[in-house]
Image: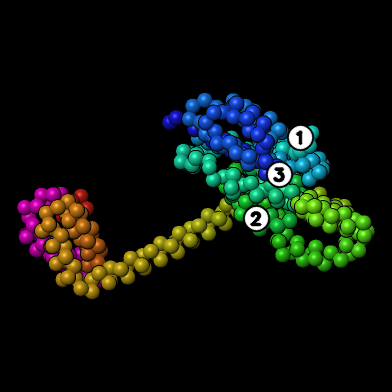
Amino acid sequence: MSEYQYYEFAAIDRPLTRTEMAELRAVSTRAEITPSGFVNHYEWGDLKADPAEWMRRYFDAFVYTANWCSCRLALRVPLATFRKAELAPFSSRHALTIETSDTHWIIDWSLDESENYDRFGMEDGSGWMRRLAPLRDELLRGDLRPLYLGWLAGAAGGELADGALEPEVPPSLSALSPPQQALVEFLEVDPDMLAAAMAGSGCASEADSAQGDRIDAWLSEWSHDEMAHMLKLIAQGRGHEAERQVRSRHAAWLKARRPSSASSASRRSVGQLRALAQSASGARLERETKERAKQETKHRQQREAALQLLMTDVDKRWAAIDAQARRGSASGYEHAVRTLVDLAEGYALTSSRKEFDRALRRFLIRHATRGALLRRLTEAGLWSG
């Protein structure tokens, strides 16, 4: 198998300048370069640049996939989006790393050792940016769920000891957004570990209701100047920044009113999550077994209904099979054998296989010299010669 690597960068907050595009073109003559991004794939060689340096200088999002079962997502957000103390609990050795430039956080999710060879052998990487880039808007709004999913991928992958504590579980982890569901798929987050983690998260409606009950009290503490500042940001087209600041202030306000021991008391160890994941695995396998049985029953009922319909005018079916055989062509023989397979099942369901065998012998008397037809009947297990 030849090598395959896919690189895609996106400029979101501002377009690339002509000078910047020229700098990128000097690195790659084949890449698709526009003011909004850079896209290229390699079947030999590699990108002659450091993606991390490009993220510091040019871009807000980066997606990478390689057919040796590796992939990577990086997003850049302004430093004002998070405090260092907010991000630190989520970082790990490989699955989620966090760096800084002079002006931005650069958050990097990685999957290095997938065993899903079919996935990486078939996909070309081109659809991931569209699905994953909206995570950046979620981060800008203060949503910590993408960070928790990166931490969970590291925990499930063995990067953390059993005694390590999870970060505080973000609200609504049990109601992931479509981009977050795409991140779960991208990182191949263990479904049982995810189910265990979700058990420690309040549902979206509960979180929204709790915030709604307190919103008036929170707003009463705002000064006129503070509210005017937020409205000015919105009027200047800086709505994301305003929303981020409002959400950050609200989260801090809620946290300040939470009992000081509540956060640490609710945090589970990686070992506890793994134990919960084992229980979740058993429940999942049981659900999947029941669902397979349900689908098999449905399929069998549909098949039996179709066979009952087939047998309502069996003489007509034999006449059609005879006509196909008389054509003397490969396609006619194949069509005849497919119908005979169905008829064999139909006879077994409505009367008996012996009756089918008698009818088949009468059919073969008329077509005994058709060797290609007899060979197909033998291969289908309908005739033994």
Looking at the picture, how far across and down is residue 74, in whole percent?
66, 39
The residue most toward the front is 18
Q: Residues within 10 Å of mark 1 (few under 14, many from 20)?
A: some
Please name the residue shown 16% across and 65% down the image: 320
How far apart, in angstroms, are the residues tagged by discs 1 and 2? 27 Å
Please name the residue shown 69% across and 54% down the image: 173
Q: Which badge, 1 or 2, comes first in the chain's sequence?
A: 1
Residue 25 placement: quadrant: top right
User: Which label was assigned to residue 100?
Assistant: 1
Residue 161 placement: quadrant: top right
Looking at this view, is 218 or 384 the one in front? 218
Name the residue tied to disc 3: 13
Badge 1 element: strand
Above or below for 308 versus 46: below
* Amino acid type, residue under disc 1 in the picture: Thr
**In this rendering, which labeled residue sits more in front, label 1 or label 3?**
3
Badge 2 element: loop
* Amino acid type, residue under disc 2 in the picture: Leu
Please name the residue shown 53% across and 59% down the image: 287
Name the residue tied to disc 2: 176
Q: Where the N terminus falls, by quadrant? A: top left
Q: Bounds of the magenta span?
A: 349-375
Query: Does 373 appear in magenta?
Result: yes
Looking at the picture, how far across and down is residue 276, in whole percent?
65, 51
Looking at this view, is 124 or 295 the one in front? 124
| Colour pattern of the rendering | rainbow
* Amino acid type, residue under disc 3 in the picture: Asp
Looking at the picture, how far across and down is residue 272, in whole percent?
69, 47
Please name the residue shown 53% across and 42% down the image: 126
Above or below for 61 versus 199: above
